[in-house]
Amino acid sequence: MCLLHANELPLRHVFATLDGSTSGPNTFTGPIGKCLHGPASTWSVGQFEQIAMPTPSFPKLPTHVVDDLSTDQHYANRICGAIINGAIEDDLVYLEVGPIVH
């Protein structure tokens, strides 16, 4: 199994359980998916609360690990860090990402 799918498939199943099936490669049938239309980079960043963690900060990955991450994995790591630390960097807010697909 490709390790990139190990990142993608569990989230896809969680989303399908919470929101229902898709009606095409980039169209959704549930209430959450219907709100996720258009380029993600045009969405506004909503207010959010920092996630309470037993440790005060999100661990920083060593450079050699970050260098081996795919673009999606790197983006996910940065988003998780922002949510856990309670602040999102401007370059991450305006990062162009691809369309949302199942």
Image (cartoon, helix red, strand yellow):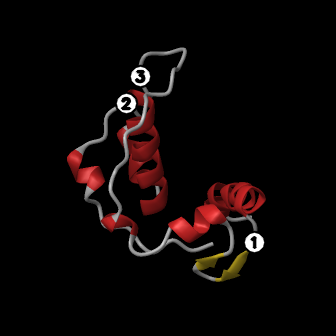
| Amino acid under disc 3 | Ser
Crowding at label 2, few (<14), some or many (≥20) Cα neighbours within 10 Å? Answer: some
Q: Where is residue 45? Give x, y as percent.
A: 34, 50
| Amino acid under disc 2 | Gly
Q: Judging from the image, what secondary structure is the residue with disc 3 in?
A: loop
Lower position in the chain sequence, tag 2 or tag 3: 3
Residue 86's disc is 2
Q: Nearer the viewer, residue 24 or 4?
A: 24
Q: Residue at x 60, y 80 (%)?
A: 27
Crowding at label 1, few (<14), some or many (≥20) Cα neighbours within 10 Å? Answer: some
Single out the residue that lies furthest toward the bottom: 24
User: Is residue 50 placed above or below 62 in the rendered structure?
Assistant: above
Q: Where is residue 9? Give x, y as percent.
A: 70, 61
Question: Residue 32 is drawn in which quadrant?
Answer: bottom right
Q: Where is residue 14? Give x, y as percent.
A: 72, 54
Crowding at label 3, few (<14), some or many (≥20) Cα neighbours within 10 Å? Answer: few
Q: CA distance from mark 2 to mark 1?
A: 32 Å
User: Is residue 59 placed above or below 6 in the rendered structure?
Assistant: above
Residue 57's disc is 3
Q: Where is residue 64? Give x, y as percent.
A: 40, 44
> What residue is pinned by disc 1?
21
Lower position in the chain sequence, tag 2 or tag 1: 1
